[in-house]
Amino acid sequence: MKTSRLLLLLGIAALVATFFALDLQHYLTLDNLKAQQTGIADYRQAHPMLASALYAALYIAVTALSLPGATILTLAGGAVFGVLWGTLIVSFASSIGATLAFLAARFLLRDWVKSRFSTRLQAIDEGVSRDGAFYLFTLRLVPLFPFFMINLAMGLTPIKTRTFYWVSQVGMLAGTLVYVNAGTQLAKVESLSGILSPSLLGSFALLGVFPLLTKKMLEFFKQRKIYADWPKPDRFDNNLLVIGAGAGGLVSAYIAAAVKAKVTLIEKHKMGGDCLNTGCVPSKALIRSAKLLSHIKRAPEFGIAKTEVEFDFAAVMDRVQQVIKTVAPHDSMERYTELGVEVIEGSAKIVSPWAVDVTTADGVKTLTSRAIVIAAGARPFVPPIPGLENIDYLTSDNIWNLRELPKRLLVLGGGPIGCELTQTFARLGSKVTQVEMAPRLMLREDAEVSDIIQARFQAEGVDVKINHTAKELIVENGEYIMLAEHDGQIVKIAFDKVLIAIGRAANVQGYGVEELGIALSPRNTLETNPFQQTNYPNIFAVGDVAGPYQFTHTAAHQAWYAAVNALFGHFKKFRTDYSVIPWSTFTDPEVARVGLNEQDAQAQNIAYEVSTYGLDDLDRAIADGEAHGFVKVLTVPGKDKILGVTIVGEHAGDLLAEFVLAMKHGIGLNKILGTIHIYPTLAEANKYVAGVWKRNHAPKRVLAWLGRYHAWRRKV
């Protein structure tokens, strides 16, 4: 614990201990207040300003330290200062004291609680960030909730201090007024419970619910307003209409059809979306061919003295297309039609919250639907680099049209797409230069991961240029040149083809978003709430067009929530669960992660322990010639609960699945250690990293006594 925290904690503990040791609570009782009322009133008459200041200071101290007696002090305020001044002093003193208690709890406990219960707190923090003022106001209006507990609990949330203060002052005002007014009739007060009658408590409870009711009413009128200009059909053609047949759209349509809803799926280009046609499937097919070549080059490592290989790049790219065709039936129009989905090939445009114009070869047709799911995907982001418009540049969309291997390939971007294609084309024989403006590749991963990937790339002939910012593309002496800034100097990089791989931008134009007024997020995606709803409650968005993740599996994950909420949300709505999101970058070695890594934990000030197992010690990895990489697990300090896992190595994405399951269902490292893993497999690494954690937490004192016990047993 930091010195400042320790000193504050000791100071608070000393004050509280002194209060009880000296039996000061005896002075804060109803009987004592009645007995001392005349003397206190006389002192106030003689010294009005000093009496007010001392009273306020005492009230602040009692409230800040969460000591018993605030109710008696409130009565005293009415008895001594009257309704007006008593209410004024108590209102400010109680709010200041409550805020000090709030800040103390935040300073002393927030980081500790967050480090141990980060996953559980995530939903609470999101709710407080969104509606914290309403929640606090409700709690303040109902005296049944102990105010000191509210102060401490709110200190553990992300609510802003100024919001806590003003909401507390306004929310406690009604209760303050009741008690202060009761204090003016102190002689008639027989007990504290007599102040709040059942009817008064009921009134406070109703008053407490009022903010939430107000919020619901505002939401209702907001919805009425947003729909006001749009005539609602008397009946609908569909229960659900889905725009886009990528992963998110396909799963949305599948679920709707499975529960016998009438669903129409509209796709203007190709079924399967980016993943099937220009993303996951073609890239992994190309990576496989390139990896085979890399293994052939490593033949001497496996005891094979000489190998020769010839390949045709065009044939490799044709194989990629063949793989797409083989996978395509899984996402085909025929399959989804058989499942009960009406599939239309055409362009969609939302013309009202319940209507979509579909343009096909046969003309324009208007379809109505009670709910709409937008799964319009994303496209490669192309930066405004001067000169780029004059070059026939490549992206992850059109690189699959290549049939001639670029001799010199320039790759802009050090993220997952850029890294996968950099290594792949280097292995196929291109001279690849990779340019990244950040200080390292794969910036979202820990630095040691970046170091491993960069070292492998350089060993395979890639010219990795980090801290380089593209400034301009020019033609010089008939040669393409990129001008990049590095350490304040301009560097020239020659190339034949350039691949732009610096991210993807959501498709938010061209299908009615602007005309309808569907709100966009700061990331320029469709803004959605936790239920995947846009600002039109019957219009949902999933996948890359919604974010925050751009993975095929998260698009499918979101689609379940969108479809269920769209069809059954009038009964029950489900918040999208982002608690356990895995991903993998399919470089060689692969990089897979779920949950926190070290840089994330440090940025969020979450305490953690690290257990690492090096794959260079794993029998199967050694036998396969893949003895490199590691499994790194972050756990709650002192416990086996998993906060996050990073795996670098052969089949890292496959190995990660066990940890994804463990995190999803609360399984700790002890149970992974107690699970049989087949020998010899790469999956044993998961068990061995659990063993590392176990050794680090071995009960040393118990083991020492066991050693003595066994020594004694050898003597008898």
Image (cartoon, rainbow, N blue to C red):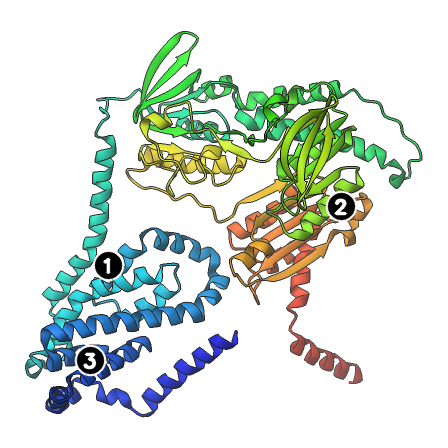
Number of marks present in the image shown:
3
Give the Cα distance between marks 2 and 3. Answer: 69 Å
Disc 2 residue type (three-letter): Ala
Give the Cα distance between marks 1 and 2. Answer: 57 Å
**Tag shown at residue 138:** 1
Q: Position of residue 153 (x, y in %)?
A: 35, 66
- Secondary structure state at the residue bearing disc 2: helix
Q: Nearer the viewer, mark 1 or mark 2?
A: 2
Q: Give above or below for 101 relative to 268.
A: below
Q: Residues within 10 Å of mark 1 (few under 14, many from 20)?
A: many
Whether pointer 1 and pointer 2 mark residues with C-beta atoms closer than 8 Å, the reply is: no
- Secondary structure state at the residue bearing disc 3: helix
Which residue is label 2 attached to?
Answer: 455
- Which residue is located at x 12 percent, y 88 percent? 37
1 or 2: tag closer to the N-terminus: 1
- Say which of 638 and 477 sits in front: 477
Q: Is residue 458 left or right of residue 512?
A: right
Q: Nearer the viewer, mark 1 or mark 3?
A: 3
Q: Position of residue 216 (x, y in %)?
A: 23, 46
Q: Position of residue 73 (x, y in %)?
A: 20, 80
Q: Is residue 341 visible from the viewing direction of this image? A: no
Q: Residues within 10 Å of mark 3 (few under 14, many from 20)?
A: many
Whether pointer 2 and pointer 3 mark residues with C-beta atoms closer than 8 Å, the reply is: no
1 or 3: tag closer to the N-terminus: 3
Which residue is label 3 attached to?
Answer: 73
Give the Cα distance between marks 1 and 3. Answer: 23 Å
